[in-house]
Image (cartoon, helix red, strand yellow):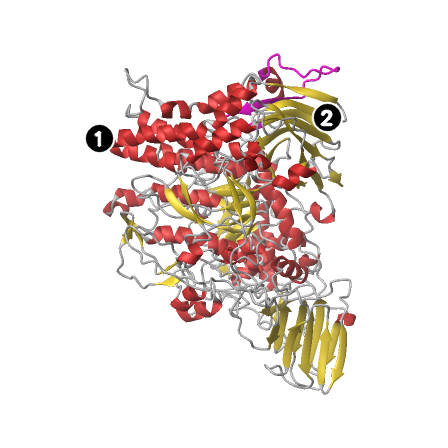
């Protein structure tokens, strides 16, 4: 078997033999699952030069080795496939008839012409599962429905295609600054129900060390994934053979920060204070390449001019709970000025006096291990927790043959497995580009230097990234991170880029320092700008801070999704078609429809187009999937239905992904059309196959008076547009849909950032991800989860559940069961005492939340008890709130006098004044507050044991049928709905209908009032305007709702709610009058205020 040639040792003098011994393959001892590359003989069928391995009922390996009397098949692990013995053997049968070998599982049937080389007529697989969309496949068949994977980098690329055929055709398979191999991989899933992964060109790994062990010995080595539309099943099967997606440290799901221009020891600490003083979370600090000596791009020794006491710096950063990383470029090798150069030479047996450099060579095991253990390990022991591998020097050379054997996959492999190779239980992590299939084991992804340009391509680059990131989950690479930055001349773009990052898999801020590499003194100073959130202007900063705080709050939810990725191979960020594979809009993700799932509860649609210059609102398409959903920002209920196309009813094996007809409206400056393309290389065939319209408007006009937004060449047809809605978002808004019935687990978000850690002295927003969960927020998305008439008749009105996952966040102890899970569920029961003719409020429905005792083996530093904030979203005011727990029995909670805060527990108790719980033990374990601004009931409870269950019951007030009739009468004025106020409306839950969207109306009315107040234009604020002020009243309604709820005045609460549509109507009319009478001075304010209300 071919072995790799030893490297050329430049300037080295050999003085002794090598002392290395092998400790075993690290992939076998870490979090990557089983490493048993030799399949059980019971799963294997050999026929001459062909070998077939039945891995699962829908996954089969097909090999063809050199045609000899004794063919040698590949039994070593490869970079992409490390495990072929899955334990239990999948049942299958085999038979030979008329020279045809037939292998059958419960799902597929393989037919091979014995003695033949593989061809389209000698190797065929058919489906025998009538419920699968997969029909058949033959060898060398070209897939037209592959859902694509990912490529190595976005360096220098803008919006490249992910179709590997187009990568070769359009880019000549050249990507990145170095214009080398793109490492493009096809997806593991397809709309045709099958996907072929070719392992023939991958390199094998040594069974001793997981080091390179030569190329695959097979001529042909294919893996057939025949999972139909069970995309999750295909991904799960892949991680069983390709290795699990190791859990990243918990800090990785928080907020990262780095910058290109130099830190020093003090400014690195100051940067942490930049976040602390502005109440912004921070969990990882990354030092770009400035940290090391500057003799070249490669360096492994701290520059003591900048970092004179480096251990002091990292002691402080680690004390604050931060993880740290250092940027590294390995290409130039270890030079003689490095601190550890002499030790490395001694280990390798080289003379350090006559040797000038130890070259970097990925095919030389001794020098690779000496680099990792002699040079980099001392840094890891005292400073950096992981490495940002910024390799840009090409995918061949440096001991690499190129293609599947490249430095990108190798540096990720080595540095992700180092800790386990050394016997440590710490988690390994890297920040690196993609090196090919198998790279899913080595997270996190670095997409390269974002191409920030000063022209109309900027927004297109942003709009491409959600598609790029979600699609990568099709090869298990679900943790792409991007340089979150914006050009200095467009702060709105910066805000939107940061918001997208905040709701992506990894939130990595990176100020690139636009001045680097440019002659700033000879250019516009704005081009040489430093771009950071706190120097972007107040409105922009507020929007960015809110997004970063939202990211920090989501960490418990996201970290539970990290565990799901490890267990099932599904990315934290995933395409819509994973959940809705037979709905054609789920496949429409594009630069104007960027939505995706973040975890299993949230659908995120980041704003990726600029706002209208007049209204300051950005319009964006949104698909409402089947089922009930709630817009998180507005509280508006949305109900989606199945699309008109999908799986063919008559031919179950045919997936229809476009309407039967295509009607194209001509794009004009007044008739906006929406981009259907997902990348910058979309062609007419792709466009029309998607059911979209093609119009090559290379010199077309602009949209809505924006010179930076061009007509798209490929745009959505009228038929597709009928499946979508248009969402209008302000600067501080990212559209998010929450699945009705969900319980969203977060950190409580407040100005104080939560409880102080034990010992105090460190702000909880700094390094919060490193600590166990002492306080959690549970948001119940109550509205829209009911079964309407059927639910009312049966008495059960809905419910939901979730599971919280916890572990130590830093080690691989989770692999052996050191974690715990907590199950939570809620239900709503009908206890209504009102009738359809009632005119007053009465007892409504009863909600019960059950939090079970934590189960599992536990983990180091697991919390013994914690505090909870329970938020019931779009909630009526409660008539009674009761806490039942093992320790405190049953207690009736009292209301707060003021909005709750989250601080140290002794302060928390003082804040509640005399509103203590009325129970026999006189304990003070909880209280409730109603927030009219968000129409949310907030229940705060303290000191609940994690090993004991508890429950909360809320008896709600219920609006009368007259309240509901008044609401719809007023709502009809706005022409928002075409619904009559007949008695049939009583079959729906009134509270759902009346509270839907109230939060959004109140929020937008306050925005409208504020922008008019700034110029004293708001009707009613000037002397003599006593009869005006509808907008003033509407914007203050939240205070009225809070007062009504806290004073238990239920009739007034529901009267106020039912009158909101009328108040909105009056406020809009008031502004319309103002718009007619307004002079040009301040007219833009009136236009914006009117737009805010119109879009509420």
User: How far apart are the two marked residues, 2 and 1, measured between alpha carbons?
Assistant: 60 Å
Dot 1 surroundings within 10 Å: few (below 14), some, or many (20 or more)? Answer: few
Q: Main secondary structure of the magenta part?
A: loop
Q: Is residue 391 magenta?
A: no
Whether the residues at callouts 2 and 1 have beta carbons within 8 Å, the answer is no
Q: Quadrant of residue 363?
A: bottom right
Residue 870: give x, y in percent of width and height. 61, 30
Mark number, residue 314: none
- For the question of whether residue 897 can be seen, the reply is yes
Q: Nearer the viewer, residue 226 or 831?
A: 831
Q: Quadrant of residue 862?
A: top right
Q: Quadrant of the C terminus?
A: top left
Q: Which residue is mark 1?
A: 1081
Q: Earlier in the sequence, mark 2 or mark 1?
A: 2
Q: SS for tag 2? A: strand
Q: Which residue is mark 2?
A: 884
Q: Is residue 399 left or right of residue 86?
A: left
Dot 2 surroundings within 10 Å: few (below 14), some, or many (20 or more)? Answer: some
Residue 738: give x, y in percent of width and height. 55, 42
Q: Nearer the viewer, residue 895 or 182?
A: 895
Query: Which contiguous range is marked in magenta?
Result: 911-937
The count of marks equals 2
């Amino acid at each position: 078997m071919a072995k790799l040639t030893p490297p050329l040792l430049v300037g080295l003098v050999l003085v002794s033999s090598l002392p290395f011994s092998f400790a075993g393959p690290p992939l076998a001892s870490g979090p990557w699952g089983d490493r048993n590359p030799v399949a059980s003989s019971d799963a294997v069928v050999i026929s001459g030069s062909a070998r077939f391995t039945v891995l699962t009922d829908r996954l089969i390996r097909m090999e063809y080795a050199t045609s000899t009397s004794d063919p040698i098949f590949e039994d070593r692990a490869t970079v992409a496939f490390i495990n072929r013995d899955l334990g239990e053997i999948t049942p299958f049968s085999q038979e030979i008839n008329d020279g045809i070998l037939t292998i059958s599982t419960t799902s597929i049937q393989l037919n091979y012409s014995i003695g033949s080389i593989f061809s389209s007529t000698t190797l065929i697989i058919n489906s025998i599962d009538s419920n699968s969309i997969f029909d058949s496949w033959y060898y060398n068949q070209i897939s037209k429905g592959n859902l694509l994977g990912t490529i190595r980098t976005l360096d220098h690329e803008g919006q490249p295609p992910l179709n590997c055929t187009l990568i070769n055709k359009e880019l000549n398979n050249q990507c990145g600054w170095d214009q080398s191999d793109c490492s493009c991989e096809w997806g593991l899933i397809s709309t045709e129900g099958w996907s072929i992964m070719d392992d023939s060109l991958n390199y094998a790994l040594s069974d001793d060390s997981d080091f390179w062990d030569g190329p695959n010995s097979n001529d042909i080595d294919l893996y057939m994934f025949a999972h139909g539309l069970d995309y999750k099943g295909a991904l799960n099967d892949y991680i069983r053979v390709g290795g699990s997606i190791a859990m990243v440290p918990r800090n990785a799901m928080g907020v990262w920060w780095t910058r290109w221009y130099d830190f020093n020891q003090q400014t690195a600490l100051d940067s942490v204070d930049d976040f602390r003083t502005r109440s912004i979370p921070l969990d990882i600090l990354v030092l770009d390449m400035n940290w090391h000596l500057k003799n070249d791009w490669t360096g492994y020794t701290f520059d003591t001019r900048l970092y004179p006491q480096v251990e002091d710096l990292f002691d402080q950063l680690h004390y604050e709970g931060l993880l740290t990383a250092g940027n590294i470029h390995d290409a130039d090798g270890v030079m003689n000025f490095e601190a550890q150069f002499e030790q490395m030479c001694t280990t390798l047996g080289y003379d350090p006096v006559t040797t000038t450099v130890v070259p970097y060579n990925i095919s030389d095991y001794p020098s690779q291990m000496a680099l990792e253990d002699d040079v980099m390990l001392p840094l890891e022991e005292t400073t950096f927790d992981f490495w940002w591998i910024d390799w840009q020097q090409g995918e061949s050379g440096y001991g690499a043959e190129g293609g599947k054997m490249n430095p990108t996959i190798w540096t990720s492999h080595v540095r992700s497995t180092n800790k386990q190779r050394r016997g440590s239980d710490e988690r390994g992590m890297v920040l690196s580009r993609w090196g090919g299939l198998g790279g899913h084991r080595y997270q996190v992804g670095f997409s390269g230097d974002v191409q920030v340009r000063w022209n109309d391509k900027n927004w297109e680059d942003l709009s491409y990234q959600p598609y790029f990131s979600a699609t990568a989950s099709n090869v298990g690479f679900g943790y792409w991170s991007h340089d979150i930055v914006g050009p200095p001349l467009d702060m709105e773009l910066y805000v939107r880029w940061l918001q997208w990052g905040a709701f992506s898999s990894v939130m990595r801020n990176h100020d690139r320092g636009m001045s680097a590499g440019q002659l700033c003194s000879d250019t516009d100073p704005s081009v040489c700008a430093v771009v950071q959130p706190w120097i972007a202007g107040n409105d922009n900063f507020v929007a960015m801070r809110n997004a970063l705080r939202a990211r920090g709050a989501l960490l418990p939810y996201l970290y539970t999704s990290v565990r799901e990725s490890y267990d099932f191979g599904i990315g934290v960020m995933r395409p819509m078609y994973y959940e809705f594979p037979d709905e054609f809009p789920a496949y429409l993700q594009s630069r104007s429809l960027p939505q995706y799932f973040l975890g299993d509860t949230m659908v995120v649609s980041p704003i990726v187009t600029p706002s209208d210059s007049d209204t300051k609102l950005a319009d964006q398409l949104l698909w409402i999937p089947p089922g009930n959903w709630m817009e998180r920002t507005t509280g508006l209920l949305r109900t989606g239905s199945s699309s008109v196309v999908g799986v063919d009813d008559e031919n179950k094996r045919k997936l229809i992904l476009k309407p039967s007809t295509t009607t194209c409206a001509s794009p004009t400056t007044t008739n906006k059309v929406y981009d259907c393309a997902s990348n910058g290389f979309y062609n007419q065939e792709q466009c029309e196959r998607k059911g979209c319209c093609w119009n090559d408007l290379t010199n077309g006009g602009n949209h809505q008076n924006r010179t930076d937004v061009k007509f798209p060449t490929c745009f959505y047809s009228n038929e597709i547009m009928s499946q979508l809605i248009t969402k209008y978002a302000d600067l501080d808004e990212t559209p998010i849909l929450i699945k009705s019935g969900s319980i969203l687990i977060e950190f409580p978000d407040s100005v104080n950032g939560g409880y102080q850690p034990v010992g105090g002295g460190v702000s909880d927003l700094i390094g919060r991800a490193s600590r166990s969960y002492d306080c959690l927020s549970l948001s119940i998305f109550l509205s829209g989860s009911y079964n309407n008439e059927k639910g009312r008749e049966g008495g059960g009105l809905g419910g939901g559940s979730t599971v919280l996952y916890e572990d130590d966040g830093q080690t691989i102890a989770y692999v052996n069961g050191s974690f715990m899970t907590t199950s939570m569920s809620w239900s709503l029961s009908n206890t209504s005492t009102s009738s359809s003719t009632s005119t007053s409020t009465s007892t409504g429905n009863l909600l019960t939340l059950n939090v079970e005792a934590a189960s599992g083996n536990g983990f180091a530093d697991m919390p013994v008890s914690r505090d909870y904030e329970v938020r019931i979203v779009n909630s009526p005011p409660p008539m009674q709130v009761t806490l039942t727990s093992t320790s405190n029995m049953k207690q009736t909670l009292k209301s707060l006098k003021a909005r709750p805060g989250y601080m140290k527990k002794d302060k928390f108790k003082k804040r509640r004044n005399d509103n203590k719980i009325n129970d026999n033990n006189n304990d003070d374990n909880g209280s409730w507050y109603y927030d009219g601004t968000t129409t949310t009931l907030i229940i705060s409870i303290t000191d609940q044991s994690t090993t004991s269950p508890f429950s909360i019951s809320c008896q709600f007030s219920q609006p009368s049928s007259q309240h509901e009739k008044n609401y719809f009468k007023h709502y009809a004025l706005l022409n928002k709905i075409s619904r009559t106020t007949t008695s049939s409306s009583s079959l729906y839950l009134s509270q759902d209908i009346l509270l839907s969207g109230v939060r959004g109306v109140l929020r937008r009315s306050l925005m409208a009032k504020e922008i008019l107040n700034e110029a004293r234009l708001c009707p009613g604020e000037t002397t003599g305007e006593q009869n005006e002020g509808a907008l003033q009243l509407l914007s203050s309604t939240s205070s009225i709702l809070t007062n009504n709820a806290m004073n238990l005045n239920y009739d007034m609460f529901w009267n106020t709610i039912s009158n909101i549509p009328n108040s909105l109507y009056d406020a809009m009319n008031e502004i319309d009058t103002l718009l007619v009478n307004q002079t040009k001075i301040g007219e833009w304010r009136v236009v914006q205020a009117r737009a805010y209300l119109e879009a509420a």
